[in-house]
Image: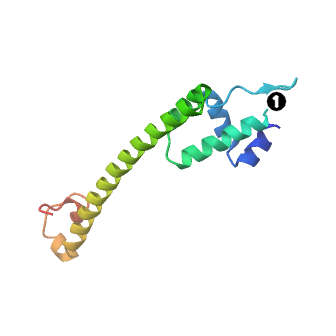
Amino acid sequence: MFIGEISKQSNIPVKTIRYYEEFGLLAQPKRTHSKYRIYSPKDLEKLLFIKKAKDLGLTLAEIKNIIKRSSRGVDATCCLVHEVFEQKIVECEGRIKELKETKKRLSDRLHHWITTSEAKKIKFTICPQIEKEGV
């Protein structure tokens, strides 16, 4: 199938598919005499795998490592994926903590909101709600 067809079947833009080739996630496809890319059902399966991995929050570099590891068999591949998932969970927990802290700071600012007339009495550059001290 040509790039437009595999793009449609995978729901991945043509530009992204080309990028995946450049990045090394997909092998360079065979080409017709007129230089059109020709993809196989295996290429479609790999694109769908990449899409699922990205949906789980994996980076392209991580996905590339997993694809490389897959040549060593399912045990080696799943071992790597287990490690990656554990690391992703730690990263998510860190982001959740940061988000909770940001939410608290925002809530504190809202709780200590000053009126426009109060704002005009203090020194600020752009917005006193952000710049005010003590919150």
Question: Please, what secondary structure does the residue beneath circle 1 have?
Answer: loop
Q: Report whether 118 appears left or right of 45.
A: left
Which one is nearer the viewer's eye here, 77 or 111?
A: 77
* The image quarter in which residue 100 lies: bottom left
Q: Position of residue 21 (x, y in %)?
A: 65, 30
* The image quarter in which residue 108 lies: bottom left
**What colour scheme does the image use?**
rainbow
Q: Report whether 97 appears left or right of 61.
A: left
Q: Is residue 94 above or below residue 41?
A: below
Q: Report whether 29 appears left or right of 93.
A: right
* Residue at x 59%, y 33% (from the top left corner): 74
| Quadrant placement of the N terminus | top right
Q: Is residue 121 above or below residue 58?
A: below
Q: Report whether 119 appears left or right of 20.
A: left
Q: Is residue 130 above or below residue 44?
A: below
Which one is nearer the viewer's eye here, 43 or 83?
A: 83
* Residue at x 29%, y 54% (from the top left corner): 97
| Quadrant placement of the C terminus | bottom left
Q: Which residue is mark 1?
A: 36
> Looking at the image, how many numbered discs can be counted on the residues?
1
Q: Amino acid at mark 1?
A: Tyr
Q: Which residue reaches farthest top?
A: 33
Q: Position of residue 64 (x, y in %)?
A: 56, 31
Q: Position of residue 85 (x, y in %)?
A: 45, 43
Q: Position of residue 57 (x, y in %)?
A: 49, 46
* Residue at x 62%, y 26% (from the top left corner): 71
Q: Which residue reaches farthest front?
A: 75
Tag 1: Cα neighbours inside 10 Å, few (<14), some, or many (≥20)?
Answer: few
Which one is nearer the viewer's eye here, 121 or 41?
A: 41
